[in-house]
Every structure is written in C-alpha cells, then in structure tokens.
Amino acid sequence: MSKVGIIGAGLSGLTLALALHQQSIPSIIYESRPDAPLNIGGAVMLSPNALRVLDRLGVYERIRTRGYTFTKVDYRNAVTDTVTEMQEFGGKDKYGYDALRIYRSELIDVLLEMLEAAGVSIKYGRKFAKVLEETERQVTWEFTDGSRETAQLLVGADGIHSTVRKYLYPDLVPKFTGLAGITAAVPTAQLQAPVDLHLPLTYVLPGKGGFVIAPQQVDGSEQLIGKQRRVEKDLTREEWAAFMADKESQVKFLQDIDPAFPEVVHRAVSNIPHDKINVWPFYVVPRLNAWSSEDQHRRVVILGDAAHAIPPSAGQGINQAFEDVYMLSLLLSDTAKENNKDYLAASLKWWQESRQARVDQVLELNKQIDLRRLPQSQDSDGLEKLNFEVGWLYDIDLDQVVGNWLKEFQ
Ligand SMILES: Cc1cc2nc3c(=O)[nH]c(=O)nc-3n(C[C@H](O)[C@H](O)[C@H](O)COP(=O)(O)OP(=O)(O)OC[C@H]3O[C@@H](n4cnc5c(N)ncnc54)[C@H](O)[C@@H]3O)c2cc1C
C-alpha cells in the first residue's frame, strides 16, 4: 500500500494510522472537527485483548500508569448486599494484562504524540462527503468543501453515524435501542464505602435493574456512577443535545434510587457535579454483509463503530475496534502479495469474517450481562444464565491468527 486515507480521528482512526506506520504504510487522517479529536464520555475500559494490541504498538507502556487498574467486577444483590457473581475484566497472570480504566483524553493525547513523532498528518476541518470513483488500483473521494483526494485505500473510521458507510449502504440508519447510559463522576470519599467492599461493582435490584460503581483516575480517587435510562423514542441530534444539556433532569434520574439499595449507593448520588455527567444513547448498527466495497474493487473499507457499533454491556466497543485496526494493518502490510490481485479481496473477506465472528460472540456476552443487570429486559427473555468464561475474548494473539492465515493463503 502506498497511501491510505483515513476518515475520522476517533480512537479507531488514530490507532489505525499508528498501526499502519508500524508496517511502513503511509496514511493521512481527515477529521471533520475543526481541531482536537472527539473526546466524549469520560473514561473507557480497556481489556487484555485491546491492551495486547496497544502493547504491540508501543502505546501500552505510555498509558499503563495513567489509568486505574483492576481485574474483576462484582455483581451484588442490592437487597442482601452480597456478591452473587463475578465477571473477569483482566488479570496479569491469567491474561497477560490487568484491565485499565482510562480517560479517553489521556489515550488520545498519547496517540497524538506518537503520530506526531511518526510524522503522520491529521487534517482537521475536512468533512468527507462522498466517494467519486473507485478503480482497481485506487479510490477518489470528495469533501464537503468540494476538495478531492485519492489513495489506494479509503478507510471509514467515522463512527456510528458514518458517512463513508453510505457508499456501501446508502439507506442504512443505526437503530436506537431505547436506552441511554446516564453516568457521572463523583469523589470516592463521598461514598464512604466499607473497606471490604470490592469496586468496581454492579448492584442488582431484582426486577428493577442495576447501579454501577467503578473507580477511575490512577489512584481510584474518583468513581463513575451510573444506570440505564429508558428513552421513549429516538431523538434528532438537536434533541439529544438538549437532552444532554438538561443536567438537572439527569441528576434527578440518577438520584431516583429505590430505598432497597444499600446506603453506599444513596451516598454516591448525594452530590453530583453537573460538569461530570455523561449521556450515552445506545445505538446499534445491524449486522452488515460487507465491510468493504466488494461489488467494486474493495478500495473502500469501514471499521470500528462505523462497521459494528454494539451495545455497551460488555464494555467492548472500543476494544473490538482496536482488534479491527490491528488485524487490518497486519494484512495490508503483506506487500509481497500486492501484485496478486486476489489478495486484497481474499484478505479483506477473511478479515471481516473473523472480526464479525468475534463481534457476534461479544453480542452473546452482552446478552448474558444484560440478563444480570436488566432482569426485565426483553432481550434477555428466555435466556439461560451461563457462566462468564471469557478466555476466548482476552487471550487472542492477533499476530498469530493473521500469521496462520497468511501461511495458508500462500
Ligand atoms: C458517552 C460515551 C461513552 C462511551 N464509553 C465507552 C466505554 O467505556 N468503553 C467502550 O469500549 N466504548 C465506549 N463508548 C463507545 C466508544 O466510544 C466507541 O466504540 C468508539 O468511540 C468508537 O470509535 P471510532 O473511532 O470507531 O468512532 P468515533 O469515536 O465516533 O470517532 C469517529 C470520528 O470520525 C469523525 N467523523 C465523523 N464523520 C466524519 C466525516 N464525514 N468526515 C470526517 N470525519 C468524520 C468524528 O468527528 C470522530 O472524530 C462510549 C461512547 C459514548 C458516546
């Protein structure tokens, strides 16, 4: 590959540029925002599968000490205040890495520093509009200001409401699930949590849903608190902006706590700073048949939320995007195969199938988690409670997986 154009400077786009650079593939990122990349939603949770990718890219060493490390989340019955189940999120001995909860801004800062050192440029204020022409060797596209660019490959890392995806699916609209996550950050001291209370945890009040408490900041001095809110109908962008801006209503929702919850939950919501509130409406992209322009020449690819935005239950949204990115960079690096005209089609097809299979497994895990957090959820009806075996998720070595496929392809 002599040049890749990446649309979107979110976590997928930034990480893809870094991964391509590691494979000596030049790329340019185009971002619609006028300056700094999207910094939404406070902190994110990174699990060993993603941390292994970030380690191979040299990112892990730089972020390791910038977030809160943990290994598991407890599920506690809110009435009896006892642990009913435990879900692993990481573990150095078992999976090579503890889980890391890190502010998105910290991760973005590190990626930007590394991209600058690598000489990768990010063009801000360039909003992708449409693909103009795709040939066997390259693709040309246009921005909303009428300017044009050409590259060997165009990657849409432009998020859940992706415009690049419209080239593959002109009529597709992400589906609103009817739920939004309402979260806030409060000082840990406010909780006056018993010393033997393990955090993070999810309190479950049977029949009434859950309440999440998760430490953040390196020293655990802050707690994310949150619960899920039903929202009657999908809202327009402007309506969501107004919904998010109505902090009083979000505080009221968070403070509406059933008396059956333990005191620590009541103290957690006693004082909620408005500037630490986040609203995350849950949209999903239905399962797509193609993540690249297979009817044309496969010179247009989508990944991350653009290809498979998934509900947040297992906290795998961004973790799965890192898997997409790293695997794709390894496949594109195989320049020896560049003259084999079947290689691009075959590798992209296999990439999508393997990635989709993992995303499907994560969706199953989500259902298991919802079964615990949302006992009345329609999605969970009739599901059997299975144990939380997650080795398949955390133990993957993508270098090995791709290496094996390349050997077979030869
Ligand atoms: C409030 C909130 C909290 C979240 N918390 C978590 C969490 O704890 N854990 C987790 O795993 N996931 C979490 N997620 C989901 C996670 O943020 C997404 O999975 C992740 O951001 C996807 O990354 P992405 O780079 O694919 O897309 P995005 O982060 O959406 O980035 C897309 C980028 O493309 C740009 N763009 C869009 N259109 C164009 C265009 N036409 N031209 C040029 N640029 C364009 C956007 O400005 C943006 O910078 C959260 C999401 C939200 C909203």
Image (spheres, rainbow, N blue to C red):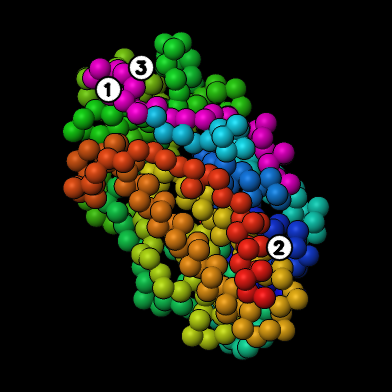
Q: Amino acid at mark 2?
A: Leu
Q: Tell me whether the residue at label 1 lies in contact with that at label 3, contact meaning CB atoms closer than 8 angstroms.
A: no
Q: Secondary structure at mark 1?
A: loop
Residue 302 visible (yes or no): no
Q: Quadrant of the C terminus?
A: bottom right
Label 1 neighbourhood size at 10 Å, few (<14), some (14-19), many (20+)? Answer: many
336 and 309: which one is in front? 336
Give the side of residue 237 with respect to residue 102, left or right: left
Q: Secondary structure at mark 2?
A: helix
Label 2 neighbourhood size at 10 Å, few (<14), some (14-19), many (20+)? Answer: many
Indicate the position of residue 213 as horizontal and vertical percent values: 41, 27
Q: Which residue is mark 3?
A: 264
> What separation in Å lies between label 1 and label 2 (alpha carbons)?
47 Å
Instruction: Kindly identify which numbered label has been placed on residue 20.
Output: 2
Up/down of 364 relative to 168, above or below: above
Q: Amino acid at mark 3?
A: Val
In this view, the mark in front (2 or 3) = 2
Span colored in magenta:
58-85
Queried on whether the Cβ of the residue with tag 2 lies below 8 angstroms from ligand 1, the answer reads: no
Up/down of 128 relative to 373, above or below: below
Residue under the image location 55 percent in, 67 percent down: 351
Indicate the position of residue 242 as horizontal and vertical percent values: 36, 48
* Residue 152 colored in magenta in the image: no
